[in-house]
Image: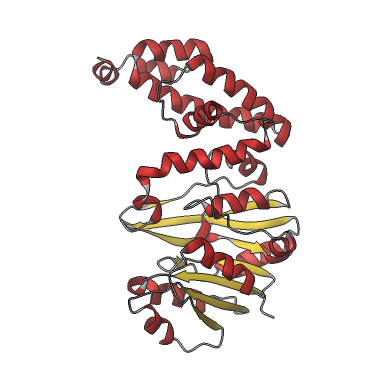
Amino acid sequence: MPKVSVLLPVYNGEKYLAKAISSILDQSFKDFELLILNDGSTDGSVKVIESFSDSRIRLYNNPTNLKLIATLNMGLELATGEYIARMDADDINEITRFEKQVLFLDQNKDCVVVGSNYTAFGEESFVSNLNLEDKKIRIAIYFENPVAHPSVMMRASVIKSNNLVYRNELLHMEDWGLWKDLLKHGQIINLAESLISYRITGQNISIINRETIGQRYKLFFKIAIADLFDEVSSEMVDYHYQIASGIYTDSSLKSIKKYSKELRKKLISNSKQKVEVDAYLNRKLKKLFFSVADNSMSKGLFYLLKFRFFDITLYRYLFTPKFKKRSK
């Protein structure tokens, strides 16, 4: 039984697949199985895979294109390792990634998922700055996906004993849903170091599906805030989406203010982290202000008074020529 099972789903990934596989096989930590899940590729992906001769590789070919969620859930069932690592067919691992994550999970038994920061390359270039601590991730998860999926290593026993899977209804944010479920069973930590290089291209799912991202976010928020409130209305989901995204859609600011106060109470009660909740919500509400102010100067002023934000940065924004021009 290997220490780690690596799940690598592939669908027409011929172009970058060889580098991805090499970055797994060349890891400083050697005790793993590499489950390559070919989801009905029609390009040369299988030839690329078969060009590698390594006993740790196990190739599974779906007879048809089952899509990512079904393929990942199949991988969870097939995994035999103590830990399950994820990897995408166009990303690249740092050579010590597995070594550092295995050591962390071995030493931190309460941790069920360990991710890391990542270095984006391709059409964009930057280094991520993710929340690292479990207590901050528990707050952030209600507003954003706090973990980079291709960077994670998970405790297999927790997933299997609790029958956890990637949820079918959370298309393109199935990993976010899994983190939400896993947080009920232990801690999620991100390592500060960037352990993967994440390729950004026009083919990334998150880019392709930008037009429907608002609908998908609202679906997740409806599920997530049900943990906090006994009843969740469509208006509450809409207010939550505006706070999370910083996109003002001309709703009642009084209603958003009322919802944010109730949300704050629930988050503090749930997390026992008042300072972190207040800091996080303030950042989100200040971001929403700029969207309100762009929409209307009068509403922007009302927002400042209603939410009691007297930050000099906001006032400077209100009275810059750039804003005055936009507000006409």
Horizontally, is 75 left or right of 266 in the view? left
Could you say where residue 290 lies in the image, as x and y percent from the top left?
A: 39, 24
Quadrant assignment for the C terminus: top left
The correct choice, above or below, for 198 with respect to 302 in the image is: below
The answer to whether residue 142 is seen in the rendering is: no
- Name the quadrant of the N terminus: bottom right
Residue in the image at 67% along x and 42% along y: 135
When asked about the image quadrant of residue 97, the answer is: bottom right
Residue 317 % position (x, y): 36, 19
Q: Is residue 191 above or below residue 66?
A: above
Q: Is residue 321 left or right of residue 227?
A: left
Name the one closer to the observer, 189 or 230. 230
Q: What colour scheme was applied to this rendering of the protein? A: secondary structure
Q: Would residue 99 appear left or right of 303 to someone viewing this image?
A: right
- Residue 196 seen in this snapshot: yes
Residue 148 percent location from the top left of the image: 51, 54
User: Measured along the vertical axis of the image, is residue 164 above or below residue 225?
Assistant: below
Q: Is residue 157 left or right of residue 37?
A: right
Residue at image position (72%, 52%) is 186
